[in-house]
Amino acid sequence: MAALAGLIALSIQGCAPAATADADSVTASHIVSITQARAVFTSLTASIDKAAASADATRGLSYLTGSAWAQASAEYAAQMSESIPVTRYRYSHPTFVVPSLHGYPEWFVVEASRSTLTAGHAGAPVETLLLFSRQKASLHWTLSGQAVLSTKLPAFAMDHGYAIPVSTTDPELLLRPDVVGATQAAVVDEGPSAPAAAVVAKGPQTDGLYRAQSALAHAASAQNLVYSWLLQGTTYPQVGLQLRDGGAVVFYGMALNTTVAHPNLDAGKPIKVPAGFFPLFAAPTEVGYHEVYADWTYQYAAIDPPAKARGGQLQVIATQGSPSYGHAY
């Protein structure tokens, strides 16, 4: 536990998301209502879809912030460069989880069935969490992130129909919400031997992601290349909602930075660019004679159990990741 405490202290300094909220003073009349949340959801999803249908990146990205913006920006660039229709979604059966707020930033969460449109036909729906936010009164509402659920969403603690937000430094949780991402990253970067592994549940986005990245490193080594990866925090909005059992669901964004390089960055045979990243290069003339960068942006939701829970572990329950940056030299 002493080692874990030291790890978390370091994580706060180098990996935890920075605060993004403006401390605007507002009156109680600015509390987000369920009716307002429904109107924002309906308007924004329709506007985002209209922009995607016309491949209008400027308009489409104006409705997005955080991980949603990073993912969509790369998607617009990649799909338009290859003359592929921009991905469009349909949402159904929305459930609104609106926190009781008394100041900015304003935000709320929606759970909805999301279907991908292909040639005008909707695919199989997946349960998805959508985070909407407005940082201050002078800004408009945006979609800040989406993450596909891998399990049923637990019951939220409610107060007169509204959810209860948790502080990023809540001491009643197993992990302070502002180090949730850093603790997950310790397992992804270091594997099961990391002290943090004791408080992080196994899964595709924890020890599973570590194994996947390790496999890529071994494959690169067999070609006399050096592969490295680092999951790190971002400045994207991070929020949390209290659960009935005293735990919380924490929403946060992360960046997975990867590189493939010749030893000592010496010039050598061109390095193969990972699938989906070449359209993200600033110039088509970029060739990886020395190194290739391939970065991903992730949106996560995780259950942070109450501190008193015996054997409690952080559990990632929703994720969405996609390529967001590529470069070679």
Image (tube, rainbow, N blue to C red):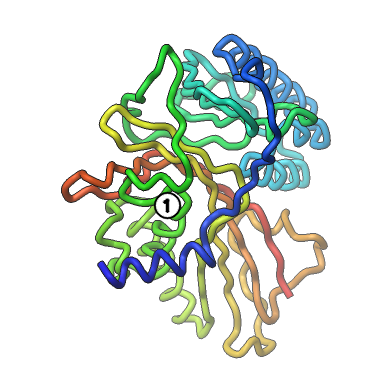
Q: List the single residue furthest toward the left.
A: 310
Image quadrant for the N terminus?
A: bottom left
Q: Is residue 209 left or right of residue 266?
A: left
Residue that appears at 35% across and 64% down = 211
Note whether residue 114 is visible: no
Q: Tell me the residue at 49%/37% (across/down).
A: 147
Disc 1 marks a residue whose amino acid type is: Val
Q: Work out which quarter of the rendered image holds the C terminus and state it.
A: bottom right
Quick check: 73 above or below 25?
A: below
Q: Which residue is painted at 64% across and 68% down in the image?
A: 293
Q: In x, y percent, where is residue 138? A: 80, 30
Outermost residue on the top side: it is: 35
Residue 23 x %, y %? 67, 39
Question: Residue, x 29% and y 34% (percent of image)?
Answer: 246
Q: Residues within 10 Å of mark 1 (few under 14, many from 20)?
A: many
Residue 239 appears left or right of 68 = left
Residue 284 or residue 229, whichever sits in front: 229
Say if 132 sits above or below 1 in the image. above
- Residue 220 in the image: above or below residue 252: below
Q: Position of residue 216 (x, y in %)?
A: 45, 69
* Circle 1 residue: 180
Q: Quadrant of residue 73?
A: top right
Residue 85: give x, y in percent of width and height. Answer: 71, 33
Vertically, is 265 above or below 20?
below
Q: Is residue 84 visible?
A: yes
Numbered label tally: 1
Q: Secondary structure at mark 1?
A: helix
